[in-house]
């Protein structure tokens, strides 16, 4: 004959089961918490440290992640390198509206010599220069960014700028006027046409400034003339 448990006996068994279960949970959790705090003492309070502590807490291995690694934004990258045929490395610095630098003056001098820039070259990239750059870029089939970017600079530097006998134009006349101011050319000869008198004046100017006496207003001669504006 089976013994029947009284309600009191069954209630007592349930209470003992619950107490025993709670004790086991408490004992287990105490070890997990100890591991978490131990790990936390060895980690800096940064995003990576917090992530590692959380991983330990849920029973996972900490992930070796690099947070906030240094990034290079292509939009902010303003320098690049190119190598010439002879192996020379040239660093190109790009410029945008509002930038000021001595290199900008040199690029403007080229634009001025080619007739894209009307005002006197300066070392600042202003709106007028930006318009001149866009016009030059359009003529050369380049992206019309209005910036002195890598492709535009390479194109400008490659320009073979020179004035020689038989040439004419407003830009040439400007250089003739500088020769007049420097007493190398008579005022009446500054007509905008490269004649014999201009060639003689250019040779004299080149000799006085240690340049090759080509009689042509080449890139090096233009640079010296521009400095006298």
Image: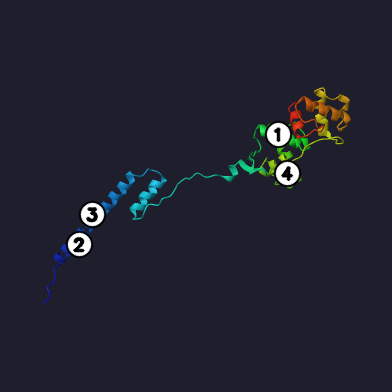
Where residue 114 appears, x then y in whole percent?
Answer: 78, 38
Is disc 4 surrounded by few (<14), some (14 to 19) or many (20+) residues within 10 Å?
many
Q: Residue at x 82, y 28 (%)?
A: 203
**Closer to the camera: disc 1 or disc 2?**
1
- The Cα–Cα distance between marks 4 and 1, rounded to whole angstroms, is 17 Å
Residue with the mark numbered 2: 17
Residue under numbered circle 3:
27
Q: Secondary structure at mark 1?
A: helix
User: What's the CA distance linking mark 2 and mark 3?
Assistant: 15 Å
Quarter of the figure with residue 16: bottom left
Check disc 1 and report the residue beneath it: 106
Observer-side mark, 2 or 3, equals 3
- Estimate the spatial distance between the alpha carbons at disc 3 and disc 1, rounded to whole Å: 78 Å
58 above or below 107?
below
Residue of label 4: 137
Q: Which residue sits furthest front?
A: 86
Q: Residues within 10 Å of mark 3 (few under 14, many from 20)?
A: few
Query: Looking at the image, is mark 4 or mark 2 nearer the viewer?
Result: 4
In the rendered image, the quadrant that contains the N terminus is bottom left
The local crowd at label 1, few if under 14, some if 14 to 19, many if 20 or more residues have their Cα within 10 Å, is: some
* Mark 3, secondary structure of its residue: helix
Q: Residue at x 23, y 57 (%)?
A: 24
Q: Measured from the top left, where is residue 3 in percent x and y?
A: 12, 73
Name above or below for residue 116 compared with residue 51. above
Does residue 15 lie above or below 62 as drawn?
below
């Amino acid at each position: 004959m089976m013994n029947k448990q009284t309600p009191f006996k069954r209630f007592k068994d349930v209470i003992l089961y619950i107490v025993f279960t709670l004790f086991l949970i408490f004992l287990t959790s105490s070890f997990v918490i100890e591991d978490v705090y131990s790990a936390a003492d060895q980690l800096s309070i940064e995003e990576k440290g917090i992530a590692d502590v959380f991983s330990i807490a849920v029973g996972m291995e900490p992930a070796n992640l690099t947070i906030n690694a240094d990034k290079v934004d292509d939009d902010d990258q303003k320098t690049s390198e190119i190598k010439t045929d002879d192996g020379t490395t040239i660093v190109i610095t790009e410029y945008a509206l509002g930038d000021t630098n001595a290199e900008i003056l040199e690029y403007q001098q080229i634009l001025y010599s080619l007739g894209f820039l009307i005002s006197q070259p300066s070392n600042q990239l202003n709106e007028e220069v930006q318009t001149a750059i866009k016009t030059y870029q359009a003529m050369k089939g380049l992206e019309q960014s209005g910036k002195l970017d890598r492709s535009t600079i390479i194109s400008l530097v490659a320009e073979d700028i020179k004035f020689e006998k038989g040439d004419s134009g407003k830009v040439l006349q400007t250089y003739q006027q500088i020769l007049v101011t420097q007493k190398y050319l008579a005022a009446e000869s500054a007509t905008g046409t490269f004649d014999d008198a201009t060639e003689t004046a250019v040779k004299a100017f080149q000799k006085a400034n240690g340049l090759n006496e080509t009689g042509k207003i080449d890139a090096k001669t233009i640079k010296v003339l521009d400095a006298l504006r």
